[in-house]
Image: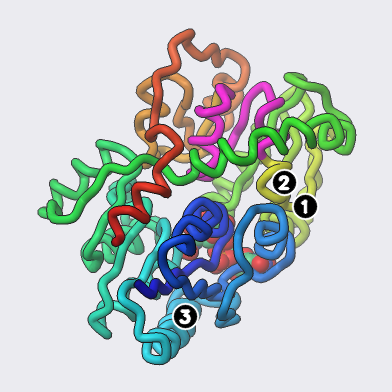
């Protein structure tokens, strides 16, 4: 089979790293990078640090409004599909690159396979939720990371070709853990922190960064903590901090975005993580690090149900309380599969 895979944003590079090589053992893959993320720390660092083949095509769509960005990708992916005439198009996750891939392929009657299908926050205020709903509706094969995702699809009437395969991000984590262990002491020394003696924080979602009230609430809470906080900052966040002239207390160390292996190393040694990222919520769970999620809801409900993740939104008092008093339970059930999801996806694709 010839498969066109579409990636474009950080989490998709990680997911494709699990699938791409395996796919190429049996099929021909054309890897399309939409160019949604383009800074080295947001894109190239993942191709260099993970076992991910270089993109065959880069559409260089870049940043812009949702319409402009998605439209540029849509036109670019359509050109690739017309040229390559693949048997199927593979999309990952819930970004604008995912949406553009699903739309371009379905209009050309190229079957779409969606990895990380069925997740829902039930919050249509999130651009990702719109992308998920549309991508799943248009997909011919749906690869789900959890039983909840399978149920979400069934509730929308999507039952055919829905497969619970587990999470491909766990495959990547298993593959990277040894390298993360080797990098750990250097990373901790670089940021001047000790194993178990700091918090890791990330904030990148539009609903937190683009709402001045929430943005200020989150940083008020972080300012009031009395532990070191290592904060790898998405470029938009860094720009906002500069634009607002927001000064932070010295225990908060804003650093450049990190590659995958370094992130795993830093997360694994942190006492607790504060984040609005979906990927980090799961990685924290797998690494047994308590997670405080800076959102009112999550797609990864199992991490909350097991007691390892707390949803606190942006309320400073709830954030402080969660950081201070969070004691995760002794039990740690297996979540999101067994680390063999990518093999199942490739098998089912055929
Ligand atoms: C996107 C995804 C989000 C995902 C995140 C992972 C959508 C709607 N959102 O959000 O689901 O969790 O990626 O990181 O697709 N920018 C740079 N350099 C870059 C990339 C972005 O400076 O290399 C800045 C630009 O100002 C840009 C802004 O970040 O406008 C936002 O980037 P964008 O790709 O629109 O969305 P993300 O917030 O990264």
The disc label shown at residue 274, or none: none
Residue beneath label 2, please?
Answer: 232
* Residue 37 lies in the magenta-colored region: no
Span colored in magenta: 264-289
Q: Are marks 1 and 2 in contact (CB under 8 Å)?
A: yes
CA gap between label 1 and label 2 equals 5 Å
Residue 63 at what x, y percent from top left?
59, 75
For mark 1, give the secondary structure: loop
Q: Residue furthest left?
A: 157
CA gap between label 2 and label 3 equals 28 Å
Q: Is mark 2 within 8 Å of ligand 1?
A: no
Residue beneath label 1, please?
Answer: 256
Look at 30% across and 46% down and name the residue there. Answer: 144
Which one is in front, 38 or 335? Answer: 335
Q: Label 1 neighbourhood size at 10 Å, few (<14), some (14-19), many (20+)?
A: some
Q: Label 2 neighbourhood size at 10 Å, few (<14), some (14-19), many (20+)?
A: some
């Amino acid at each position: 089979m010839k498969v066109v895979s579409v990636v474009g944003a950080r989490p998709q590079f990680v997911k494709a790293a699990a699938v791409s090589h395996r796919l190429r053992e049996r099929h021909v893959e054309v890897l399309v990078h939409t160019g949604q993320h383009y800074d080295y720390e947001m894109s190239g660092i993942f191709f260099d640090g993970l076992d991910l083949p270089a993109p065959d095509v880069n559409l260089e769509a870049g940043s812009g409004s949702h319409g402009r960005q998605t439209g540029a990708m849509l036109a670019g992916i359509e050109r690739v599909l017309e040229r390559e005439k693949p048997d199927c198009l593979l999309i990952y996750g819930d970004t604008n690159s995912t949406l553009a891939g699903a739309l371009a392929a379905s209009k050309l009657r190229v079957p779409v396979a969606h990895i990380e299908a069925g997740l829902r926050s039930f919050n249509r205020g999130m651009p990702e939720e719109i992308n998920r709903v549309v991508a799943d509706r248009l997909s011919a094969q749906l690869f789900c990371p959890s039983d909840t995702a399978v149920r979400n699809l069934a509730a929308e009437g999507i039952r055919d070709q829905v497969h619970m395969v587990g999470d491909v991000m766990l495959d990547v984590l298993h593959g990277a853990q040894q390298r993360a262990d080797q990098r750990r002491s250097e990373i901790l020394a670089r940021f001047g922190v000790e194993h178990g003696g700091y918090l890791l924080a990330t904030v990148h979602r539009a609903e937190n960064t683009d709402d001045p009230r929430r943005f200020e609430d989150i940083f008020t809470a972080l300012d009031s903590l009395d532990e070191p906080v290592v904060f790898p900052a998405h470029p938009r966040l860094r720009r906002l901090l500069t634009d607002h002239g927001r000064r932070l207390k010295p225990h908060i160390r804003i650093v450049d975005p990190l590659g995958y292996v370094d992130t795993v190393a830093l997360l694994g040694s942190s006492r607790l993580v504060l984040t609005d990222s979906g990927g980090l919520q799961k990685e924290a769970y797998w690494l047994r690090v308590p997670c405080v999620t800076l959102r009112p809801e999550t797609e990864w409900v199992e991490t909350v149900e097991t007691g390892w993740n707390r949803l606190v939104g942006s309320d400073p008092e709830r954030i402080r309380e969660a950081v201070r008093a969070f004691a995760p339970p002794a039990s740690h059930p297996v979540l999101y599969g067994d680390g063999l999801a990518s093999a199942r996806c490739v098998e089912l694709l055929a």
